[in-house]
Amino acid sequence: MTERAQASPGRRTVMGVGAAVLGTAALGVTGTAQAADRSGGRGGHRLDLPVPTVIGHRGTSGYRPEHTLGSYQLALDMGAHVIEQDLVPTRDGHLVCRHENDITATTDVAAHPEFASRRTTKKVDGVSLTGWFTEDFTLAELKTLRAKERIPGNRQKNTLYDGRWEVPTFEEVLRWADREGRRRGKPVWLYVETKHPTYFRGLGLGLEEPLAKLLRRYGRHRAQSPLILQSFEPGSIQRLSKLVATPRVVLLSGAGSKPWDFVASGDPRTTDDLVKPAGLKWMASFAQGIGPTLDLIIPKDGSGRLTTPTTLVRDAHAQGLILHPYTMRNENTFLPADFRRGTDPNAYGDAFGAFAAYFATGIDGIFSDNPDTALLAAADFAGE
């Protein structure tokens, strides 16, 4: 029986600290998993999510300016299982939802003459950037700005919504999720990333403590809470593990890269080390999953075509870790070369074919800018 034929529209359980994702998926075969506790009697939390889990990347950034309430609402209306927020701080310590602290491309700040003098050059995680940064604005000042499409060259239609929404605080998103959860009769799942935590801690604007405070205030600090924490810095996830029981995922950049907290601390390990069994075992001691870039699941050759899958899915499952790789987008320019169609880089390619290739590896979910497409692809894979 093929993997696709064997799959079913069931649900898999994400286990807690010291526990594992069991069932056919943990053996490298997709399908409905019968979760079991491998924690040696220590118990653990269980998260009931469909598999493959569809995560609305920054909401529905394929259709609306990212990290706006409009983008989040559309993701929820489309049926995304989980909706992502990236968090950065304001000068007065509020957590707001932006993919980066550099808001030059995602807001109309450049059109505000009163903030012209705030334009500056900074080095963030070793990269020199010139623009406007959230840590130089109070929340009240940031609220005078409006969000806009980040990549208008690729997504011209999204510019229709420029200026429609403001920059939301994370607390506003928590309130929105609670309202929508009550209205729908089931919780709204959130996927929350700490951005550049080492950088911000150096400015006296640490992210983990205020984030944990908000999670406790809104009852999302428990092992069973409908929220997943994530970061590209393992140290941030370790810090959060001591503050809340909320499930946690370590994000992984491309081969050869190094988490910035490793750079700052002198840790010699790279992503290449972390995806090996020893690295996965280490991350499993404080996290429940990993979020690798898709190229760590199936590398591409020099022409951008998919090659042979790595053993990462099998190896991570062996350590009890779920895998939520990133990011699938519908446009040709973002797809593997195998699935591009026509000559327009901004036209849609064969996204369904690409989803099928990634789902066949046994991943537990995927981030997508187009959750409606991802949901249809997941249903195809499950044989619905």
Image: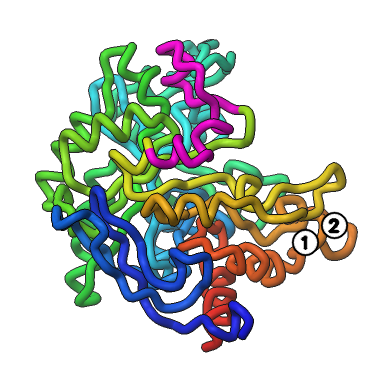
Q: Nearer the viewer, residue 213 or 364?
A: 364
Q: Would you call the spot at circle 2 few (<14 residues within 10 Å), some (14-19), or many (20 or more)?
A: few
Describe the element under mark 1 as helix, strand or loop: loop
Tell me which segment is drawn in magenta.
Answer: 257-281
Residue at x 24% of width, y 59% of height? 226
Could you say where residue 173 lies in the image, as x and y percent from the top left? 28, 51
From the image, tell me which residue sits under label 2.
Answer: 344
Q: Position of residue 152 (x, y in %)?
A: 66, 46
Which residue is painted at 44% across and 64% down in the image?
A: 26
Magenta span contains residue 166: no
- Is residue 90 or residue 23 the one in the foreground? 23
Circles 1 and 2: CB distance less than 8 Å?
Answer: yes
The image shows residue 347 at horizontal and vertical percentages of: 77, 61
In the displayed image of the protein, which residue is found farthest to the right? 343
Q: Amino acid at mark 2?
A: Asp
Q: Position of residue 181 (x, y in %)?
A: 22, 68
Q: Which quarter of the rendering shows the N terminus?
A: bottom right
Q: Which residue is mark 1?
A: 347
Answer yes or no: is residue 261 visible.
yes
- Residue at (71, 58) in percent of width and height: 331
